[in-house]
């Protein structure tokens, strides 16, 4: 919102500089983002007084003009203007000033000159040389009260505040609203509760000479939900023409283009009061009747810009007895616009449902100054004030007669509700004791009315409690609860004036959700293994998700977006694999060597009838060289056991009693994958990426992946670590080689032998199948470590346990000892 200082001064006294006012408004919550001027800076151009005019000794049409600029030296310049006279206040430019060349129209720098043998130490200027207009027949004569020596930009120009208005302050999308704010922040300290305080509002009186308005127009509101109030006046016998200069300058200063006096008046009042208005040609309103209704589904309407719009039933229309004439609150129609032949006008000032205006303007892409205000919920009392002001200006600038009376259809009228505020609540919320005098002064500065009331409630001492009953002013729609009132008092007094009170104790340490610490644990562990973390969007394409499984069938349904930005962002991801696989392919275009990548984030699984399941996941990928070649070693690529080793190390630090079993994940290669589980709950998988999946992502090497469901795993992890003393007695090591069926797994052997006492560790150190064992058999060689925490083991004790182990293996697994 742009607010010229001169316009603000129409309503309140502003004795401080624009910069000071901008600072005060910003500190009160209305941020001033910039200060501009309506004129050029005119460096070196001052207001001066003509003190002498003499004839030029060498030219009949030139004169020598002596000017006073407020300095001790009074320069003499050569001037050819016929209207220069002693006592005038003029625009004077010294050498070095940048002006507009009167002949070429281009910018030039003024230089010292000798004209017809006389030195000219400057120049008195015309409007053309200042770039104000094309007038150059005479010099620009300034008002008599212009201070000598003042920069011309301060004399002719106007400073314009550029205010970033917050969405809740629709009243500040008006000059009067900002004038109220300026008056409050400037005059707060000087307020006396016994004297009136406020701004100078425009006089809204005007003469009504015409017939009763009911003879010319009637209004019917068919949908009070979308239009709580509709007011209108009729002015007959107007003359369409150009607006006066003062009106055009004000519109231009705020960035609006003057059109004609009728349109300019509606725009001026909208800027002044913040209430959009619209003018209809009365002769084009069929039947002299306005009907405010919803549009029919699919109804078409041509707006003022000549475009045909297709409407829906949530669109509010202004219609007459035969046709629609405007989209309420958004744009008028070409079939009722004011033209050069218009003699009688209907001035509309209404209140519309803000939600309806927002949806309509955005759907039709017709966002205007009017819709911006309507969608921020203008108070229902504003239309009447704005209508009277517009009617008054119409009579002043367009002539004609106002019909007697005003139409005011107000089905949405509400009783004025007060807000009960406890005085002690101010101190509680603001952390500072506030005197009643300062509180009431702030309320008065804001135009908030109040009175004291005593309730039946009592405080802790048993005394009756007094409250303030406050009534927000008619122009404010953002004040509804007592905290709103307290905030208003605080910002007017000044947030910088509130004392800072230190906390009475230590700030409690922030304890986040356990899952955050769990995610951090995995991040730190993987970074320690040389992995690099990647970040990707939660949004994905259905095609990318399907490419992560070999058969294209997803294990869970994705959550689809109703209105995706693009096909690449049509759903939420069900896993983290696609961006990691894409990262491997992208990196392989530029570099060789080992790749270790991981990501931590959420996956999203759709569920019927309820919100999606959102597990926290960690997914990692390894590819390429695990160990580069060197003089001590040969190059070794990553394999299945590298992925397994990473997970075993991390889980080992957590003391997890997990199991590893063959997996059946659709994105991993069969027979080269495994799944992890605890207590029957599967929480992860790892293995070689299926060749078909790798091909889907243009990967031509073996890639190994692991994926852990942190949400499923975390409940199984016991906090802290278990400690035990170092062994005091030596261990005994025995080796054993077994011949087993090929179908018996190492895990099954471990399950059998781990149940025996004194056995501390079981380690597989050899696997063999070939000529030395029968077909369908394999040999597994183990190193068994025995240790007792209470005594040194004897050979006889170890032999007994070994015999029991062999017996169990033979009976349960059909094992035999290999010779």
Image (tube, grey):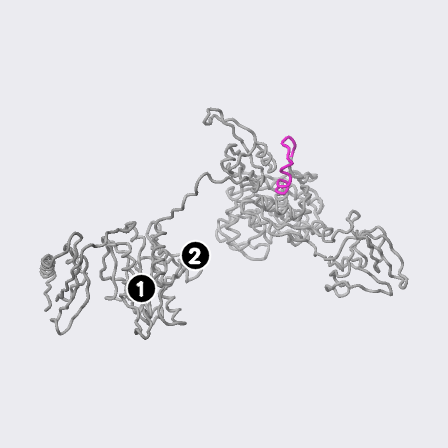
562 left or right of 127?
Answer: left
**Which residue occupies the foreground of this view, 50 or 574?**
50
**On the image, numbered disc 1 is attached to which residue?**
705
Q: Position of residue 815 (x, y in %)?
A: 11, 64
Residue at 26% x, 51% y: name it.
722
Q: Position of residue 9 (x, y in %)?
A: 68, 44
228 left or right of 8?
Answer: left
Quadrant in the picture for the C terminus: bottom left
Q: Mark 1: few, some, or many residues within 10 Å (few <14, many ≥20)?
A: many
Image height of 409 relative to 312, above or below: above
Q: Is residue 346 visible?
A: no
Q: Mark 2: few, some, or many residues within 10 Å (few <14, many ≥20)?
A: few
Q: Quadrant of residue 83?
A: bottom right
Image height of 703 relative to 232, above or below: below
Pointer 1 or 2: first along the chain: 2
**On the image, numbered disc 2 is attached to which residue?**
563
**Which residue occupies the foreground of this view, 322 or 559?**
559
Q: Position of residue 395 (x, y in %)?
A: 70, 44
In this picture, which residue range is highlighted in magenta?
180-196
């Amino acid at each position: 919102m742009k607010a010229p200082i001169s316009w603000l001064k129409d309503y309140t006294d502003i004795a401080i500089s624009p910069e000071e006012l901008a600072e005060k408004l910003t500190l009160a919550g209305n941020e001033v983002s910039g200060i501009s001027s309506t004129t050029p800076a005119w460096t070196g151009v001052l207001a001066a007084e003509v003190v002498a005019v003499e004839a030029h000794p060498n030219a009949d049409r030139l004169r020598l003009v002596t000017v006073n600029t407020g300095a001790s030296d009074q320069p003499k310049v050569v001037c050819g203007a016929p209207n220069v006279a002693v006592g005038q206040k003029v625009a004077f430019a010294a050498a070095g000033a940048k002006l507009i060349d009167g002949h070429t129209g281009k910018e030039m720098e003024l230089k010292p000159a000798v004209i017809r043998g006389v030195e000219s130490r400057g120049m008195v200027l015309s409007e053309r040389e200042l770039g104000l207009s094309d007038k150059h027949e005479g010099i620009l004569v300034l008002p008599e009260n212009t201070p000598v020596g003042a920069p011309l930009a301060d004399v002719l120009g106007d400073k314009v505040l550029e205010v970033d208005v917050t969405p809740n302050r629709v009243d500040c999308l008006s000059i009067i609203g900002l004038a109220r704010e300026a008056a409050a922040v400037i005059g707060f300290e000087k307020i006396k509760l016994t004297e009136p305080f406020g701004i100078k509002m425009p006089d809204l009186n005007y003469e009504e000479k015409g017939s009763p308005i009911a003879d010319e127009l009637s209004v019917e509101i068919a949908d009070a939900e979308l239009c709580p109030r509709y007011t209108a006046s009729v002015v007959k016998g107007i003359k369409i023409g150009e607006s006066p200069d003062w009106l055009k300058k004000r519109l231009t200063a705020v960035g609006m283009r003057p059109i004609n006096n009728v349109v300019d008046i509606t725009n001026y009042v909208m800027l002044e009061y913040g209430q959009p208005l619209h003018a209809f040609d009365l002769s084009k309103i069929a039947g002299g009747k306005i009907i405010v209704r919803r549009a029919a589904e699919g109804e078409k309407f041509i707006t003022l810009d000549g475009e045909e719009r297709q409407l829906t039933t949530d669109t509010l229309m202004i219609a007459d007895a035969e046709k629609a004439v405007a989209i309420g609150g958004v744009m008028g129609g070409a079939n009722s616009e004011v033209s050069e032949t218009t003699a009688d006008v209907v001035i509309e000032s209404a209140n519309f449902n803000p939600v309806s205006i927002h949806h309509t303007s955005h759907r039709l892409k017709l966002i205007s100054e009017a819709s911006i205000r309507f969608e921020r919920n203008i108070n229902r009392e504003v239309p009447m004030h704005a209508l009277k002001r517009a009617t008054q200006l119409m009579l002043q600038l367009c002539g004609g007669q106002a019909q007697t009376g005003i139409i005011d259809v107000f089905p949405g009228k509400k009783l004025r509700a007060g807000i009960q505020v406890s005085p002690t609540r101010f101190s509680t919320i603001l952390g500072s004791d506030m005197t009643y005098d300062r509180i009431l002064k702030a309320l008065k500065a804001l135009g908030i009315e109040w009175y004291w009331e005593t309730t039946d409630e009592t405080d802790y001492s048993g005394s009756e409690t007094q409250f303030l009953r406050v009534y927000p002013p008619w122009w404010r729609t953002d004040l509804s609860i007592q905290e709103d009132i307290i905030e208003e008092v605080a910002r007017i007094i000044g947030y910088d004036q509130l004392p800072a009170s230190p906390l009475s104790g230590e700030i409690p340490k922030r304890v986040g959700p356990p899952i955050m610490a769990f995610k951090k644990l995995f991040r730190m562990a993987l970074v320690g293994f040389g992995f690099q973390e990647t970040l990707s969007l939660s949004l994905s394409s259905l095609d990318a998700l399907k490419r992560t499984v070999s058969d294209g069938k997803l294990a869970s349904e994705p959550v689809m977006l109703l209105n995706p930005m693009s096909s690449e962002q049509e759903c939420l991801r069900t896993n983290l694999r696609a961006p990691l696989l894409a990262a491997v392919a992208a990196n392989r275009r530029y570099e060789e060597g080992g790749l270790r990548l991981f990501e931590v984030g959420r996956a999203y699984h759709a569920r019927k009838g309820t919100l999606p399941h959102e597990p926290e996941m960690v997914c990692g990928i390894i590819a390429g060289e695990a160990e580069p070649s060197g003089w001590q070693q040969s190059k070794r690529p990553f394999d299945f056991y590298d992925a397994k080793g990473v997970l075993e190390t991390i889980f080992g630090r957590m003391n997890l009693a997990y199991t590893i079993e063959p997996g059946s994940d659709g994105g991993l290669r069969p027979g080269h994958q495994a799944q992890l589980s605890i207590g029957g709950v599967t929480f992860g998988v790892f293995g070689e990426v299926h060749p078909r999946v790798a091909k889907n992502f243009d990967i031509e090497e073996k890639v190994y992946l692991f994926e852990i469901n942190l949400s499923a795993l975390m409940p199984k992890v016991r906090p802290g670590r278990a400690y035990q003393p170092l062994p005091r007695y030596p261990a005994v090591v025995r080796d054993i080689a077994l011949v087993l069926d090929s179908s018996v797994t190492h895990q099954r052997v471990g399950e059998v032998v781990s149940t025996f006492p004194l056995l501390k560790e079981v380690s597989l150190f050899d696997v063999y199948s070939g000529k030395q064992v029968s077909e369908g058999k394999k040999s597994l060689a183990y190193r068994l470590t025995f240790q007792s925490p209470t005594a040194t083991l004897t050979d006889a004790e170890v032999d007994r346990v070994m015999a029991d182990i062999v017996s169990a293996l033979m009976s349960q697994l059909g094992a035999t000892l290999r010779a």
